[in-house]
Each structure stands twice: as structure tokens, then as C-alpha cells.
């Protein structure tokens, strides 16, 4: 198979990956029939995560391991060995979803995923094979079988989901009423929640339909639907890195929409898929989010420049004042482990969705840990950290009680961040009153540890550096809090 890189790529034979490359890969303990994948190779389901199993299934979307580990050969589009002699030449050609190389050497993107995981498809009297390029690009025609090797009982759902996507994006001649389109999208989201094997299929169908779509409006609706469905379920560990690379490299219509998609992928990676079905009310809220200004994940300067997102009296972000006020109203100053104990995941997700959609309703929230969790999420999801990244190294030199170092850093922080820092730290100082601290069991060191990632953002990818930096981040935030407690804080 020395020429596999040329034979399976067709017009994109300028990809060069040695055929001898091997990698530790997941080996399933079950045996299954062999079938071809989209690259033309026989698919051995005993050596790869399978979409075609029949019967009870585990939730693979939440687990990175599919079976016992053993060596086997990977597709030449899935792996780039760490060898200085090897080279990978990337040219986009006509395909806008071309892959990128991830930090661990894997070649990522929807085309790489399709080469290894899409089912081989044939057409015509001579049953000629459909080119991979065509399988990952937009089509105006309906499909008659899934893109992936799904169990036979899910074929009808996969075909119907593609029709729902086409009708929602507006790439069909039929004039579909809005209420009918909404009902179809609700079915699609909840079908994915119920059947984890269908999730990757739906996300791959959307990726296909936004790639090379001749209608800019239809492509934008497709991207938005991709983000909305991530409220309901997450891709499997097998698809996730390829989908992230696809979103990062594809021509998403607007910067805000690209940022929304990245936020959704990061959020669903943390929280996983829903267990309860989406209600019609939740879906209506979710469908409005892609068209609204970003609250979570937006740039602080943009948020504070938007009258809709800013308090008229204080000029601070509404979400900041709303969440801190709700923490106090729900008795957060009496809750043990405040900011350390997470809020209920479903309640946090619903409250966040309402805030993002511009219709916050906190009447059903009774646990102060819910707004506390949301406050940390909002701070950590800001496009830029409160303390700018160029000041990170200076912050790492500070020690508790080092007022001079803290003052020097604060002088270089943008004005919008200064105002938020002052408000937030004054709130933390209130929580450090002896009577409050005795009930919450959260002293200055504990709060500093929890809020370190909210003020500072370590861009390193090495876990050792991240853990080492967390201690220094805690020291800086502790020094910042003590600076305000002493009354020495001043801004330019």
C-alpha cells in the first residue's frame, strides 16, 4: 500500500504522508462485517470505533475510549507522524473544508474524517464510486443512505434529517411554513439526544451542506443550525477534533458566528450532551442566539459599548450586575462553598441560554450556586481576559501583599477591564467579611484560587506549565483582593 496517499486522494494527491505511518489506535473487542470506507479501503470494524453496531450502545460521545488499545494502521489522512523527514503539503483546491494539523500531529478536518469514516457510495448503472470531494460538499439532491455506517434501523432517520436540514437552510424549491420548519428542527435536536449514533451523522450532514453552498444566506442558516444543535448534543470524541478544525478553517460568514460556534464547541466539550429533550421554548430561545450580540464570549469593550448589554446607570455589563445581585438575593453569603460548589448543570445551561437570547428569567432559580457558576463562566468565556495576556508574566511575579506589583499591573489594564475588576473585587471583599466567611468557609486564598482563571488566562498547552501557573495566578488574585481590602486601590 505504498501509494495509498496518491490513490485515495484523487485530485488532491499533493498530500504526502508515508504509508508506513502507524499509531496506537482503539481496537474494539467485538467483530463486525467488513465494509469499505470512503477512501476505498476495507473497513475493519474490529480495529476502529463503529457506527454500525446493532443493539444496546454506550454513550460514546462522553467517553474517549471505545475498546482496548492495540496497534493498527490508520488512514493516511488521519495521522501525521512526528518525523522531520516526513512532510505534509496542504493545498485547498476546491474544497473549503481542508484539514489542519493538530498539536498532537493528527491531520484534522472534515475531509480527513470523511476519508476514514464515511461509507463508500456508488451510483449509476456501472456502480461507479462517488468521489470523496463530492461526498463532503454541498448537494441539492436528497440522500438515500447515511453518510456514516449507521445501523439499518437508523437509515430512515438519517435520510429524514438531511431533508430537514435542506428545508431549514432553504435549499429546496418547496415553500415550507415557518411552524413546520420549527417542528422539524425540534424533532432533529431531540432525535440526536435520544440516539447518540445519529449525532455525528447529523453534524456531518450540516458540514457537508455549508461547504461550497451557492447561497450565502443558506450557508449562514446552516452554520447557525450547527451551533443551535450543539445546545442539544455533542459530537463523539472521534469527530470532535475534526469538527473544531473545520469550524476554525471554513469561511464562516461573520466573525460573531464563528466565535459563537467555537464557544458552543468549547461549552459542549465541558458539559456533554443533554439527557432531557429540548422543549419548544428552549429551542425558540436557542434559534435567536446566533443573531444576537455575544454576551458569553464577547469582547468586554464591545459589550460595554452596546446599550442593550450595559446598565444605564453604572455603565457595567448587565449580566455582571444581574448575577452578583442574584447571588446575594438567594443567600449566597450563607452558602457553604460558594463559587467552589457547582450549580445544577441543567439549571446553569437554561439560565445561560436565556441570557444569551436576551430573555433572562431567574424566577425558577433558588440555588445561589447557579448564578455563581454562571458568573465564572461569563468571566472565563470573555474574548480577552480581564488582565491582558501581555501582562500575564508580570502578574506571575506578584506575591500576596505585594501592593506595588498589583498597582503597576492595574495601571496598564484597559479602562473597561478596570471598572469590571473594581466591581468584582469589591464583591469578593464583601464575601470576606468575618461573619460571611464563617458561613461560606471561603477565605481569601480559596476565592483567589477559584477566580484565578477568571482574571488571568494561561495560554500554555503543557499541563505542567498550567498547574505551575495556577499557583502564581492564585497569589496574584490574592494580592489584588488584599490590595482592595486595605483601601490602597487606585486607578488612573
Image (cartoon, helix red, strand yellow):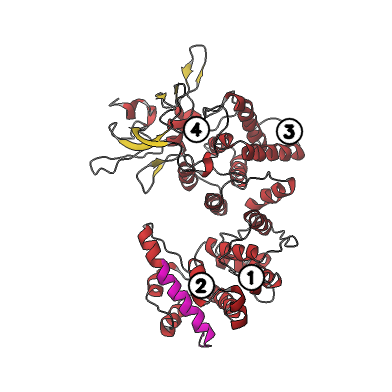
Out of 400 and 303, give the one closest to the viewer. Answer: 400
Q: Which residue is mark 1?
A: 335
Q: Is residue 395 above or below residue 453?
A: below
Question: Which image quadrant for residue 111?
Answer: top left
Of mark 2 and mark 1, the one earlier in the sequence is 1
Q: Which mark is residue 60?
A: none
- In the rendering, at what x and y percent does residue 193 appear? 63, 40
Q: Nearer the viewer, mark 3 or mark 2?
A: 2
Residue 463 shown left or right of residue 230 in the figure: left
Q: Nearer the viewer, mark 4 or mark 3?
A: 4
Q: Is residue 303 above or below residue 491?
A: above
- In the rendering, at what x and y percent does residue 446 appear? 51, 72
Q: CA distance from mark 2 to mark 1?
A: 14 Å
Dot 1: what SS? loop
Question: Which image quadrant for residue 400?
Answer: bottom left
Q: Which mark is residue 446?
A: 2
Residue pictured at 55% horizontal, 28% vertical: 150
Of mark 3 and mark 1, the one earlier in the sequence is 3
Q: Which residue is mark 4?
A: 136
Whether residue 455 appears in this view of the structure is: no
Q: CA distance from mark 3 to mark 2?
A: 58 Å
Q: Which residue is mark 3?
A: 175
Q: Nearer the viewer, mark 2 or mark 4?
A: 2
Dot 2: what SS? helix
Which residues, given as a range, are shown in magenta? 470-492
Dot 4: what SS? loop
Amino acid at each position: 500500500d505504498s501509494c495509498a496517499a496518491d490513490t485515495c486522494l484523487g485530485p488532491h494527491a499533493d498530500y504526502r504522508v508515508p504509508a508506513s505511518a502507524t499509531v496506537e489506535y482503539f481496537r474494539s473487542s467485538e467483530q463486525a462485517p467488513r465494509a469499505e470506507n470512503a477512501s476505498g479501503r476495507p473497513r475493519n470494524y474490529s480495529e476502529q470505533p463503529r457506527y454500525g453496531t446493532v443493539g444496546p450502545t454506550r454513550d460514546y460521545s462522553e467517553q474517549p475510549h471505545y475498546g482496548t488499545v492495540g496497534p493498527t494502521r490508520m488512514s493516511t489522512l488521519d495521522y501525521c507522524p512526528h518525523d522531520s523527514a516526513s512532510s505534509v503539503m496542504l493545498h485547498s483546491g476546491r474544497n473549503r473544508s481542508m484539514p489542519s494539523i493538530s498539536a498532537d500531529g493528527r491531520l484534522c478536518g472534515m475531509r480527513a474524517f470523511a476519508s476514514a469514516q464515511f461509507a463508500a457510495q456508488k451510483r449509476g448503472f456501472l456502480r461507479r464510486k462517488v468521489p470523496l470531494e463530492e461526498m463532503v460538499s454541498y448537494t441539492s439532491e436528497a440522500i438515500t443512505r447515511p453518510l456514516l455506517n449507521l445501523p439499518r434501523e437508523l437509515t430512515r432517520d438519517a435520510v429524514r434529517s438531511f431533508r430537514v436540514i435542506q428545508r431549514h437552510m432553504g435549499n429546496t424549491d418547496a415553500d415550507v411554513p415557518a411552524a413546520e420548519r420549527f417542528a422539524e428542527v425540534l424533532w432533529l435536536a431531540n432525535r440526536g439526544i435520544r440516539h447518540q449514533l445519529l449525532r455525528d451523522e447529523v453534524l456531518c450532514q450540516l458540514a457537508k451542506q455549508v461547504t461550497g453552498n451557492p447561497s450565502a444566506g443558506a450557508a449562514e442558516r446552516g452554520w447557525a443550525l450547527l451551533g443551535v444543535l450543539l445546545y442539544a448534543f455533542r459530537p463523539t470524541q472521534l469527530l470532535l477534533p475534526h469538527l473544531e478544525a473545520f469550524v476554525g478553517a471554513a469561511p464562516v460568514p461573520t466573525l460573531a458566528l464563528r466565535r459563537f460556534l467555537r464557544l458552543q464547541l468549547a461549552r459542549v466539550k465541558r458539559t456533554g450532551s443533554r439527557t432531557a429533550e429540548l422543549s419548544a421554548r428552549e429551542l425558540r430561545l436557542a434559534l435567536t442566539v446566533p443573531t444576537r450580540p455575544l454576551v458569553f464570549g464577547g469582547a468586554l469593550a464591545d459589550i460595554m459599548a452596546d446599550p442593550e448589554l450595559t446598565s444605564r446607570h453604572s455603565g457595567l455589563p448587565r449580566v455582571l450586575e444581574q448575577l452578583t445581585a442574584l447571588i446575594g438575593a438567594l443567600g449566597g453569603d450563607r452558602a457553604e462553598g460558594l463559587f467552589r460548589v457547582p450549580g445544577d448543570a441543567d439549571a446553569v445551561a437554561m439560565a445561560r441560554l436565556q441570557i444569551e437570547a436576551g430573555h433572562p428569567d431567574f424566577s425558577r432559580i433558588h440555588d445561589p450556586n447557579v448564578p455563581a457558576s454562571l458568573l465564572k463562566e461569563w468571566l472565563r468565556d470573555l474574548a480577552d481576559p480581564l488582565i491582558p495576556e501581555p501582562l500575564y508574566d508580570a502578574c506571575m511575579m506578584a506575591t500576596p501583599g505585594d501592593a506595588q506589583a498589583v498597582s503597576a499591573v492595574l495601571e496598564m489594564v484597559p479602562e473597561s477591564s478596570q471598572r469590571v475588576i473594581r466591581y468584582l473585587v469589591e464583591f469578593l471583599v464583601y464575601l470576606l467579611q468575618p461573619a460571611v466567611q464563617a458561613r461560606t468557609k471561603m477565605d481569601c486564598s480559596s476565592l483567589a484560587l477559584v477566580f484565578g482563571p477568571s482574571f488571568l488566562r494561561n495560554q500554555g498547552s503543557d499541563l505542567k506549565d498550567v498547574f505551575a501557573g495556577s499557583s502564581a495566578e492564585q497569589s496574584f488574585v490574592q494580592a489584588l483582593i488584599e490590595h482592595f481590602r486595605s483601601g490602597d486601590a487606585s486607578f488612573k
